[in-house]
Image: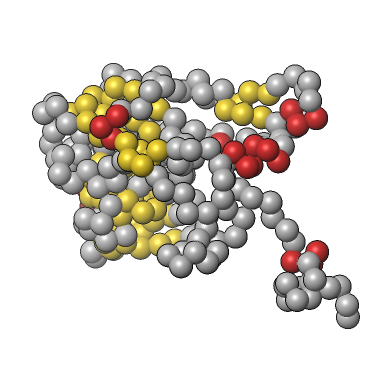
Amino acid sequence: MGLKQYKPNTPGQRGMSVSDFADITKSAPEKTLLEPLKRRGGRNNRGIITARHRGGGSKRRYRIIDFKRNDRDEIPAKVVGIEYDPNRSARIALLHYADGIKRYILAPLGLDVGMHIMAGQKVEPEIGNCMPLESIPLGMKVHNIELNPGQGGKIARSAGMGATLMAKEGDRAVLLMPSGELRTTQLKCRATLGTIGNIEHSLIKVGKAGKSRHMGRRPHVRGSAMNPVDHPMGGGEG
């Protein structure tokens, strides 16, 4: 896992860097875990733009990720491959369960092909295992943390993210967020051990405008560069 820089044959390549994808072991996605992904261009159900600067971009399909893992308790799973997911910054891992079921999960740092992981109430506190916060030892890094029991992981799901379990007080767990904020959640909520992989994602430099368009980001215009009729900060008078 690292960054790759090109010889600057063009101006756009001079500052550009990309992931070397050294951690990817499987290129083709699992067909049974794919869904169509409709592109909305930042528009709501009435066709009005509610999120600016979105649209276009490369066509992609959604990978169905298991954020809950509550129906797979005590069933061992083997890691078959680490894959690239165009819909998120984190890598995803394909699991083959002992009963034949296949699932995608977010791939934590240190998870390799051939490893066996498990979910449950009293499983070993090892990387990739999923369990309630009440069963996790203090001081451990966790990701994909639920806000409400059974809801599925909501916190610390992007590349390089991980929260630290600081304390257990009554029926609440105290978590140190990646931002430095302290938050509490119920001890019944589940989390996965470890930190999300692809930690160098934040160091990637896009390099050129065309690459932003491939990612579905349209040009961003500053409000101060507009006319007064178009934006509260437009015009420059006063």
Residue located at (12% from left, 36% from top): 74
**Front position in the image: 180 or 90:** 90
Q: Residue furthest right?
A: 238
Can the viewer see residue 116 in this picture? Answer: no
* Viewport quadrant of the C terminus: bottom right
Q: Give coordinates of residue 224: x percent, y percent.
A: 79, 67
Q: Give coordinates of residue 188: x percent, y percent.
A: 21, 57
Residue located at (74% from left, 28% from top): 13
Query: Residue 61's quadrant in the figure?
Result: top left
Is 74 on the left or on the right of 95, as rendered? left
* On screen, residue 78 above or below 176: above
Residue located at (45% from left, 37% from top): 60
Q: Give coordinates of residue 218: x percent, y percent.
A: 64, 50
**Front position in the image: 89 or 64:** 64
Residue located at (74% from left, 66% from top): 223
Query: Residue 192's quadrant in the figure?
Result: top left
Q: Give coordinates of residue 56: x percent, y percent.
A: 56, 45
Is 1 on the left or on the right of 13, as rendered? left
Judging from the image, the colouring scheme is secondary structure
Query: Residue 204's quadrant in the figure?
Result: top right
Is 199 on the left or on the right of 224, as rendered? left
* On screen, residue 115 above or below 66: above
How many numbered marks are there?
A: 0
Q: Residue furthest front?
A: 47
**Front position in the image: 185 or 86:** 86
* On screen, residue 167 above or below 6: below
